[in-house]
Image (cartoon, rainbow, N blue to C red):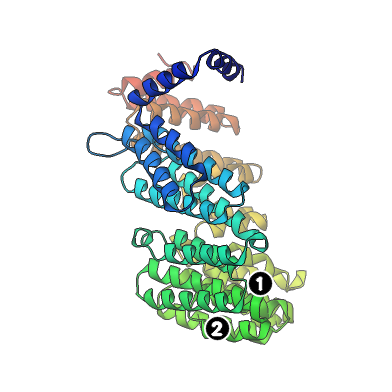
């Protein structure tokens, strides 16, 4: 602020001709200065002329910070978007003046130029993406005050957004297209515009009926958007009818299930979930199958179908879902639980390597030190994770496991960092009451690895009397 005041004072002391010369000199050195002046001059100009000047300004900064091949290095991206930031400020000014169409046109210009810039820049820092997000937010703010926009301008802005969403440059950016379409929906204030919006969504849905992930995602999000649109504008009954026509989309099925849950219609939840399981099991979509099972489990829990809850809950636990363990346990009396627990752990143990995480989690939950020791004995590389839970009941076994682990790690080590780590575990062995064992293994390793001076050096730092 102090610098600006000093500069203002200095400029005020100059006459008009001197100020013109200063500006011309600056413009000669930097093309963007000329573009900024033109943008200021045309601030009252409506329509495409102002957008043309905005586009020139954005591109002048992009050009200044690009290399000879037109690519913008990540270090230069923040400078390259400066033009867009200046234009964004102009968009705010235009909106404050009540020129809604002008503001929308400028924001769309920013979007177009930034998407194009993404193709020729390293935006690993997310700078260009942030400019795009801010532009979409400002556009969203404009649509939220649609009641203040004159009808003719509202219709024009509505059409601008729909037309923009069809631009080829956004084909690889479905979220941008969706944001434009959603913003247009807020401007659909009468039946004619709502019908036009609906037709546009249906048309774009039909155009994205391919099998690729992006096409499926785009069509699914449009379906969600259309559902909300129908629900808001036409009521629950028509929205539900549409919802059940789109159950091939998992996100839509999820909405239908949650609606049924909230209304207490648990039979419907189970029916929808089972259909989803069957469909996605056939397509090999294990994550979605598990999601539908979770909904079914919740329906059983809420409706009090204990036997079905237990059966499905155990199935999910055996599939590696720890979150269901307590739900199953809570359905049994304390005296009933031990044999169920024993059977469950036996079956889970038979599952093999893929279930190694949930198995010890349950053992810790149940304070089952004996089974935990058995587990760690089979997997000695996990002794560091669980020695604290075993050392009181099984001190000797813990020391033996740590000693075996140290020997294994020493054999695998070849760098000083790895040697230091072996010595750290030796200190851990001492910490759990194995001072004699720690000294012994350190001497064994010192004698064994004569050809590893760095390892011997780290072992000597233990100060166990090795020379």
Q: Nearer the viewer, residue 317 or 299?
A: 299
Outermost residue toward the left?
A: 69
344 vs 178, left or right, is right
456 vs 2, left or right, is left
Residue 217 locus on image (x, y percent)? 44, 68
Q: Is residue 65 visible?
A: no
Q: Quadrant of the C terminus?
A: top left
Q: Nearer the viewer, residue 467 or 52?
A: 52
Q: Nearer the viewer, residue 127 or 90?
A: 90
Q: Quadrant of the N terminus?
A: top right
Circle 2 residues within 10 Å: few <14, some 14–19, many ≥20 = some
- The image quarter in which residue 32 lies: top left
Q: Which residue is mark 2?
A: 274
* Tally of numbered tags: 2
Q: Residue at x 65, y 81 (%)?
A: 234
Marker disc for residue 38: none
Mark 2 and mark 1: span between their CA atoms? Answer: 30 Å
- The image quarter in which residue 171 lies: bottom left
Q: Which residue is mark 1?
A: 339
Q: Is residue 311 above or below residue 99?
A: below
Mark positioned earlier in the residue sequence (2 or 1) = 2
SS state under label 1: helix
Residue 229 locus on image (x, y percent)? 60, 74
Q: Residue at x 73, y 74 (%)?
A: 331
Check contact, mark 2 vs mark 1: CB within 8 A. no
Please name which of the two marks, 2 or 1, marks the residue nearer to the observer.
2
SS state under label 2: helix
């Amino acid at each position: 602020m102090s610098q600006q005041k000093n500069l203002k004072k200095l400029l005020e002391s100059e006459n008009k001709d001197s100020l013109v010369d200063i500006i011309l000199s600056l413009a000669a050195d930097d093309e963007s200065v000329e573009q900024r002046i033109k943008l200021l001059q045309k601030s009252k100009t409506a329509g495409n002329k102002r957008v043309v000047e905005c586009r020139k300004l954005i591109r002048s900064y992009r050009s200044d910070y690009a290399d000879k091949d037109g690519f913008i290095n990540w270090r230069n991206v923040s400078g390259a978007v400066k033009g867009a930031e200046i234009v964004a400020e102009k968009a705010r000014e235009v909106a404050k003046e009540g020129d809604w169409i002008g503001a929308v046109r400028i924001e769309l210009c920013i979007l177009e130029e930034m998407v194009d810039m993404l193709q020729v820049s390293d935006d690993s820092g997310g700078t260009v993406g942030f400019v795009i997000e801010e532009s979409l937010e400002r556009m969203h703010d404009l649509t939220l005050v649609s009641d203040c926009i004159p009808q003719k301008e509202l219709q024009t802005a509505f059409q601008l957004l729909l037309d923009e969403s069809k631009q080829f440059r956004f084909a690889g950016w479905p979220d941008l297209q969706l944001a434009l379409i959603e913003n247009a929906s807020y401007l659909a204030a009468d039946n004619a515009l709502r019908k036009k919006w609906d037709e546009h969504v249906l048309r774009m849905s039909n155009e994205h009926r391919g099998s690729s992930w992006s096409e499926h995602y785009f069509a699914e999000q449009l379906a969600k958007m259309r559902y909300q649109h129908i629900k808001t504008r036409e009521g629950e009954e028509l929205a539900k009818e549409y919802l059940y026509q789109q159950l091939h989309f998992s996100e839509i099925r999820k909405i239908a299930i949650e609606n049924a849950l909230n209304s207490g219609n648990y039979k419907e939840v189970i029916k929808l979930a089972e259909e989803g399981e069957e469909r996605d099991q056939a397509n090999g979509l294990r994550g979605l199958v598990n999601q539908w099972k979770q909904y079914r489990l919740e329906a059983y829990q809420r409706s009090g179908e204990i036997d079905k809850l237990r059966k499905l809950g155990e199935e999910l636990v055996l599939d590696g879902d720890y979150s269901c363990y307590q739900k199953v346990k809570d359905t049994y009396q304390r005296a009933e639980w031990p044999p169920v627990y024993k059977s469950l752990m036996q079956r889970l143990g038979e599952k093999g390597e893929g279930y190694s995480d949930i198995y010890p989690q349950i053992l810790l939950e149940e304070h089952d030190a004996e089974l935990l020791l058995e587990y760690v004995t089979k997997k000695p590389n996990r002794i560091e994770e669980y020695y604290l839970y075993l050392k009181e009941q099984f001190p000797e076994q813990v020391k033996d496991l740590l000693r075996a682990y140290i020997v294994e790690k020493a054999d695998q080590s070849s760098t000083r960092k790895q040697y230091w780590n072996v010595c750290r575990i030796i200190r851990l062995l001492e910490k759990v009451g194995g001072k004699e064992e720690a000294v012994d293994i350190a001497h064994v390793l010192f004698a064994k690895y004569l050809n590893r001076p760095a390892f011997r050096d780290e072992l000597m730092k233990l100060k166990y009397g090795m020379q």
